[in-house]
Amino acid sequence: MNKVKCECGHVNPFGTGICESCGKPLEGEAVELLNMRYEGVARRSQTYNRTIIDKIWNFFSSVKVGIWIIVITLVASSIGTIFPQEMYIPPTVNPAQFYGDEYGVLGQMYYQLGFHDLYGSWWYMLLIAALGVSLVICSLDRVVPLHRALKTQRVTRHENFLKRQRIFGTSKVSNDDETVALVKKNLEKRKYNISEENGNLVGEKGRFSRWGPYVNHIGIIIFLIGCMLRYFPGMYIDDFVWIREGEIEVIPGTNQEYYLENEKFIVELYDEDDEVFGEALRNSGATVVKTYQTSAVLYKKEDTDTIGADGDLVEVARHNILVNDPFKFDGYALYQVDYKLHELNEMSFNMVEKDSEVVIGDFSVNLFDPQAEYELGEGYKVKVRHYFPDYFFNDQGQPASRSRIPNNPAFIFEMVSPTHPDGEVSFLAIGQNLEPFGENDYQLRFNGVETKHVTALTVRKDYTLGILMVGGFIFMVGLIQGSYWVHRRVWIQRINGELWIAGHTNKNWSSLKDEIDRLIVGTELSSPVDQVAEKEKEKEPKEEEQDGSIK
């Protein structure tokens, strides 16, 4: 598009409202105050609208679009807090069933619409990305031309530029040089940066405050990048692992590199002789946990040169994990968060001939890894047809399992014997021993149970925390920069035998006028006028006359 050349010789980009150099208004003979927002510069979004890139740029450069994206993101985020997110529900339950059981129809809809994992959903990430794009484009669309305009401005400004400033005044003085020198001295006392040209001067301070909003944007963009990096593998881990006493489990998020053994789990309770809680415990009869601890052993899988072979586990470190004393290693941290005492681990059964009460044999079932069948010798064996670790009857009246944890184990066994080679079926659960297909000659009976303590650990790794802190710090710097400082300019110019004075600020106009009045103390300059305040005063009597209060 054609550029606009000012009479001062400066070539301005198409769409510029005020000459970047001399300040002459380029829109014609208008008399209203100049729109000094972004110094009247041409923004890309206001001048180009041809290609698809221009249209995308113009869409995201709109402040209204940015506000709507923020509103939609806030609404979506608030919906995510109605019910707990999936990461905060018990790890042993099925989310598809949990939300319906706990919160009814609304909970089921919440799950089906995907709000249970809202902050990790693709469309929420798309909203965050759109907000980031909007901030980047909005900032570039304004900060680049603003920087160019502030950098190229001259001291001597066009008459129309000064007249159409909000703070403006003219004065005749007996000695121009002396007056200008005195004003310059006052400006320097008030920490203004002075620039002179042809006997004219401009005092400026606080320009850096103009970049406050854009520093805010940079901080927010860095913060959003940190949030999005949490969904990249290896950058952020917040997982959960249950480890039974005496067992070794792979640590989630370590790519099967690290393993942890729960060597021993200890729970210590307050007793009734305790000086602090003893009386309360005696009165209530309750038990209160004093501390619980996991004696942990960390292993690392040793590399092997053999293709397809698993490496050996090598002990790396030991640590007693307490509630406020996590186990930290290689960027990971293991926190003690929960425990379960006496969890069912193994059940023993006897196979008995009912008539003679003779025990044919016994076997034990690992409730976490049951075998398909158990040989008892002499042609006797027991097959596991079905296993329900946490059994209940579903809506169809059939046995099912809520989870894989043996909270309420139940079995359907098939007992094979020489007299019954096709097998007899038996259903066993805690407190139940049923023969669903008629009277059996053989029966399975509980013979004992083995339990283990289980510890629950949260696995944390966060490489994004530093990025989030940097983003937050930069945001606060921008907030302070734009809130506690203001950009002020005062022009003193010799025009037609008079001294013209004009002032501009990005906020606090009354404060700027008071400061200019203090700058001209001791000179012959008259106080400039706040043209907006004067117009408002002129309107007040007219409004009163219309109301009939003044006639």
Image: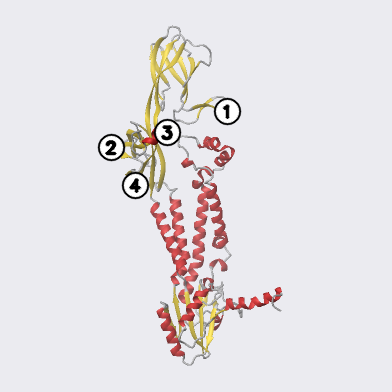
Please provide percent x and percent y for residue 355. 45, 7
**Among the two numbered marks 3 and 4 on one chain, the one whose residue lies closer to the N terminus:** 3
- Label 3 sits on residue: 284
**Residues at circles 3 and 4 in contact by the CB criterion of under 8 Å:** no
Query: What kind of residue is marked 4?
Result: Gly
* Disc number placed over residue 331 in the picture, else none: 4
Depth check, mark 4 against mark 1: the one in front is 1
Residue 151 placement: quadrant: bottom left
Calculate the distance from the C-alpha at mark 4 to the C-alpha at mark 2. Answer: 19 Å
Report the side of 341 relative to 89 (left or right). left
> Which numbered tag is attached to residue 395?
1
x then y, percent, for residue 60: 54, 60
- Of 324 and 14, nearer the camera is 324
Name the residue type under label 3: Ser
Residue to which mark 2 is pinned: 314
* Dot 3: element: helix
